[in-house]
Image: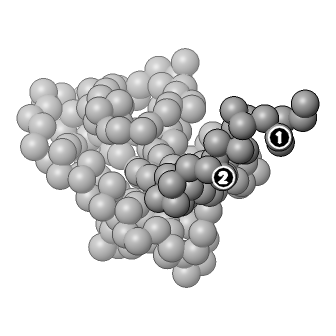
Amino acid sequence: MSGESNPDSVPQRFRSAPKPVRWAGAVTAIWLALILLIQISGVFAAPGSDAFPVQCPEDAQNCTRIASNPHRADGVEELLHNASPEALRSAVIAWVEDQPRTRIVFDDGTEFHAVFYTALMFFPDDFFFQTYCTEDDRAGLKLHSESRLGVGDIGVNDVRVAELVAHLDKIEFEPVDECIPAPVA
């Protein structure tokens, strides 16, 4: 007896289920297929390097950058704190680890790359930061947050960067007299 004529087969039970159950099953299957497609596309769209990006794509609506060639984020080029680069990067990493749906991809002690996944559809967004010492012995921080897929990000990257900046502004770092760069791992 084939699976089609067996009344206990999955296709047969699906066809005999009430219409709302069939719709829910179909919607769930489509949602899972879309997530799978997004994840596969995200792998192919991943940056070719874990190095801090040089700039956002021209006229990008899916990228926020606080660094040279700033993009969105009110044109801010760098964040400065009277702290050690190690304390600053530890605060950023702790913030990243507290965020839902994140995965750390690369961390060499100076440069850092994590992937944030959006709720519901799990679109991947790349998040980079870099710490350094300035000439006036302060710790500097450069940020870059960019969606891998699509043309826009509905402001998600701008909000992410703004939330991190607000978080860092609340921290009272231990002042340092001399900025010593974090060792590269």
Question: In this view of the protein, which residue sits in the foreground, 142 or 156?
Answer: 156
| Residue 86 image point, x, y percent | 33, 26
Query: Farthest right residue?
Result: 1
Is residue 136 depicted above or below 90 in this figure? below
Q: Tag 1, which secondary structure?
A: loop
- Which residue is label 1 attached to? 5
Quarter of the N terminus within the rendering: top right
Is 88 left or right of 126, judged from the image as shown?
left
Residue at the (54%, 26%) spot, across then down: 108
Residue at the (18%, 28%) spot, across then down: 176
Residue at the (36%, 46%) spot, across then down: 141
The quarter of the displayed image where residue 56 is located: bottom right
Question: In this view of the protein, which residue sits in the foreground, 145 or 184?
Answer: 145
| Residue 131 image point, x, y percent | 40, 39
Residue type at numbered disc 2: Arg
Q: Can residue 35 be seen in this view?
A: no
The quarter of the displayed image where residue 171 is located: top left
Is 62 left or right of 34, judged from the image as shown?
left
Report the number of numbered marks: 2
Residue at the (33%, 55%) spot, across then down: 160
Q: Can residue 98 be seen in this view?
A: yes
| Residue 134 image point, x, y percent | 34, 44
C-alpha separation, residue under disc 1 versus residue under disc 2: 12 Å
Label 1 close to label 2 by CB (< 8 Å): no
Residue type at numbered disc 1: Ser
Mark sitting on residue 15: 2
| Residue 52 image point, x, y percent | 56, 47
Which is more foreground, mark 1 or mark 2?
1
Q: Tag 2, which secondary structure?
A: helix
Question: In this view of the protein, which residue sits in the foreground, 16 or 94?
Answer: 16
